[in-house]
Image: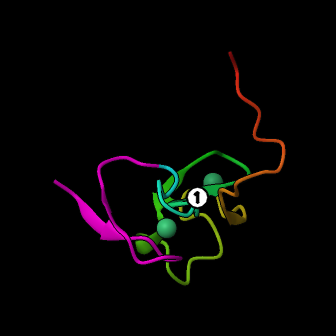
Amino acid sequence: MEAFKCPSCGLTTWGNLKFCPHCGAALNVTCEACGYSLRYFMAVGMNFCPKCGGKMKTESKSKHHEKKS
Ligand SMILES: [Zn+2]
Ligand SMILES: [Zn+2]
């Protein structure tokens, strides 16, 4: 199982989590243009998408994180 540490709080997490269950930090980095996403630890220093050259950004815990219910 894929295990890694949260970049923010250091909690060991695993699996396909998008956000740290402890501190809410984003664990994925996503291309704004094509939607390509990587685990944050694979994207260290990666500012542009390897697929389309678009800008990569951390999926942020947007303030408008609304529940779709
Ligand atoms: Zn965390
Ligand atoms: Zn892209």
Amino acid identity at mark 1 = Gly
* Mark 1, other Cα within 10 Å: few <14 / some 14–19 / many ≥20: some
Image point (50%, 50%), residue name: 18
Outermost residue, front side: 22
What is the quadrant of residue 6 in the picture? bottom left
Closer to the camera, 38 or 20?
Answer: 20
The residue sitting at the right extreme is 64
Give the side of residue 52 with respect to residue 12, left or right.
right
Residue 12: x and y in percent read 31, 68
Q: Is residue 51 above or below residue 35?
A: below
Magenta stretch, residue numbers: 1-17
Q: Quadrant of residue 54?
A: bottom right
Residue at 58% over, 58% down: 24
- In-front residue for pair 10/16: 10
Give the x, y percent position of residue 61.
70, 54
Residue on which disc 1 sits = 24
